[in-house]
Image: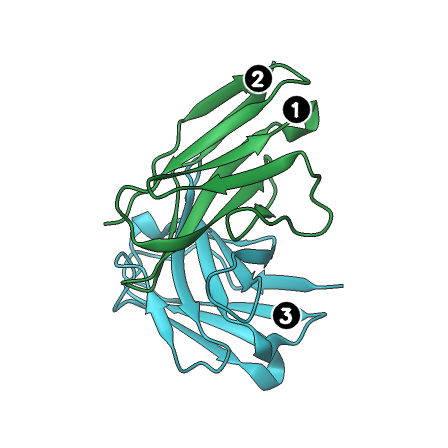
Amino acid sequence: EVQLVESGGKLAQPGGSLRLSCAASGFAFDDYGMHWVRQAPGKGLEWVSRISWSGDSLNYAASVRGRFTISRDNAKKSLFLQMNSLRTEDTAVYYCVKENSDSPDYGMDVWGRGTTVTV
Amino acid sequence: SYVLIQPPSVSVAPGQTARITCEKNNIESKSVHWYQQKPGQAPMLVVYDDTDRPSGVPERFSGSNSAREATLTISRVEVGDEADYYCQVWATGSGHYVFGSGTKVTVL
């Protein structure tokens, strides 16, 4: 079964740091780009960051650039999000998401259940 | 900043057709993708690359895309289709991914 399981979300202070992790299983993790997408309470979806399959290409939303860092460990089938200088507006459910294809523009087909960050 | 504009809500009777629009607002993009999110659940991809459906998604869900606007059409709407729906594009110029504002579909 294809699965993504996030962890690391918790209550943090403004200005503090958190590291989110995502464990992947059931697919060839190192074949796909991966994303973090967040959803503030009662709000819509907001894309946060993307990392290519190799880790060589990184993209960030303007709202988190310079504060958040995405990374991956293909050997451990894991995705990470290092979150620094946290703000109250970072409060959200954070989803780990797999790309639908080995191309970056075919949508996102597997979503984790999310981990909650409260700042 | 990039914005995809969707109507906040659409109401439809069971068995009828729901159409959800996504105005691309001059974002340079190639394909549009659509997600369904039911309360308390993670989003689910229902249409990708403008018109394709992942396996397991009913044929009642279809998509179209033009230069200015994309549309998700749900035919023969069922009570179980009640959810929030989001469009999404990859802004090729910036490499950013953008979600629409979301549309709540209510089945009357």
Cα–Cα span, label 2 and label 3: 38 Å
Q: Which mark is residue B12?
A: 2
Left or right of A31 in this view: A86: left
Q: What subunit carries mark 1?
A: B
Q: Which mark is residue B77?
A: 1
Amino acid type, callout 3: Ala
Amino acid type, callout 2: Val
Q: Inspect this view and state whether residue A92 appears.
A: no
Helix, strand or loop at disc 2? strand
Q: Colour of chain B?
A: green
- Residue A24's spot in the image, x, y percent? 63, 70
**The chain coloured cyan in the image:** A
Amino acid type, callout 1: Val
Cα–Cα span, label 3 and label 1: 34 Å
- Picture quadrant of residue A100: bottom right
Q: How does the figure colour the protein chain or chains?
A: by chain
Q: Inspect this view and state whether residue A109 appears.
A: yes
Residue appearing at x 55%, y 72% in the figure: A32
Left or right of B23 in this view: B59: right
Q: Residues within 10 Å of mark 1 (few under 14, many from 20)?
A: some
